[in-house]
Amino acid sequence: MPEWLNILIRSAGLFGATLILVRLIGKKLTARLTFFDLVTGITIGVIVAAISLNLAGNIINGLIALAVWTILPALSYILAIKYKTVRDIIQGSETVLINHGKVLEDKLMEARYTPEDLMSQLRRKNVFNFADVEFAVLESAGDLSVLLKKDKQPLTPQAAGFKAGMESVPQTVMMDGIIMDEPLTAMGLNRHWLHTELEKAGVAPENVFIAQVDSRGQLYLDLFDDAVRVPKPKTKELLFSTLKKCQADCELYALGTKNEQAKEMYGKSAAILTETISELEPLLIK
Amino acid sequence: MTIGSQVKQTIASLKGAKSTLEQFAAMEKNEEAVKIINRNAASIGKVILDMEKQLGELEFAEPQYKGF
């Protein structure tokens, strides 16, 4: 057998074997690398390369090494899920670098972090002033997690005193012109509804690239033909302005009538509608 | 336009708004949102009833414009 054929067969076989072995280790290795994960990954890669290029000498020896380096990490991950001590040994634990806005120099030393490293990691989190940081922890995967002081945190609707609208995840009901039945049924809709909505928008189904339905049943479309302008669903906005108009009408009638009883009724209706508008505003206007 | 027909128009708009809200409530999965929508649909319903009662009196006063 010529050398090149040998390498071809080996490499192809190892490719399949590595795919299976790597599945054994699980997904964790690719998610966020701790130092241990990094070492394991590199070692497996080097062993595979060595075997496939016939650098390992005996193929059996190579395969044994490969098996050990996949089974032991897989085992250690399983043990790590069960026992905290194992977890601390193989994954390391996180180190608090800044607490109550003060940099802990001894912890910095422990993590082999220079002040420049710390500042650069903070900058990566868009923190240019270390005094803004309340708490920062170095995760075992090597990235820094930062909690800003309360007054430096980004403004949330709650902090600003707004009521935010509630929205569930929109469902993608069409992709590449193909109707996806499962998300449609999950929303309690069917193909017939979708066809009606597409007709309303004046769009042919085969022209739709992506179609999404939001939690209030409104259809958002993107077409293959970008020259065609799709009307944005306006039901929510329309409903909101209708309510506002009705409220204004009631106030107008209250001013216009001379009948005391009617005046009171219109006034009350206007008040109810005002409350309704303020309650629905976060739901209808995003 | 007489006041009677204007009130009729407002009532019709309110009815439309109410049914749109009810449609949203039927689609919505978030329970809290459903509660808010239903509550407000009910209060709009109350307003509609009040105004319809008033409309009856208006029609009595302007009999020439009676009827929907």
Image (tube, rainbow, N blue to C red):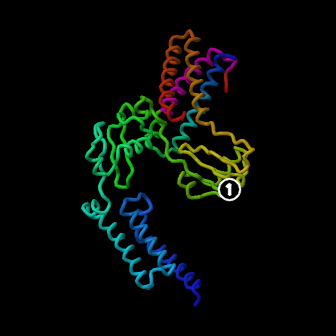
Residue A158 pos. (x, y %)? 41, 33
Which residue reaches farthest bottom? A1
Observer-nearest of A285 and B65: A285
Q: Residue at x 58, y 18 (%)?
A: B57
Residue A283 pos. (x, y %)? 51, 35
Q: The residue tagged with tag 1: helix, strand or loop?
A: loop
Residue A236 pos. (x, y %)? 58, 35
Residue type highlighted by circle 1: Gly
Classed neighbour count for the residue bearing mark 1: other residues with Cα under 10 Å, few (<14), some (14–19), many (≥20): some
- Quadrant of the frame with the C terminus of chain A: top right
Observer-nearest of A82 and A76: A76
Magenta-colored span? B40-65
Q: Is residue B66 above or below residue A128?
A: above
The chain to which mark 1 is attached is A
Observer-nearest of B58 and A277: A277
Q: Is residue A174 magenta?
A: no
- Quadrant housing residue B52: top right
Horizontally, residue B44 falls left or right of residue A158, namely right
Q: Is residue B57 magenta?
A: yes
- Residue that mark 1 sits on: A177
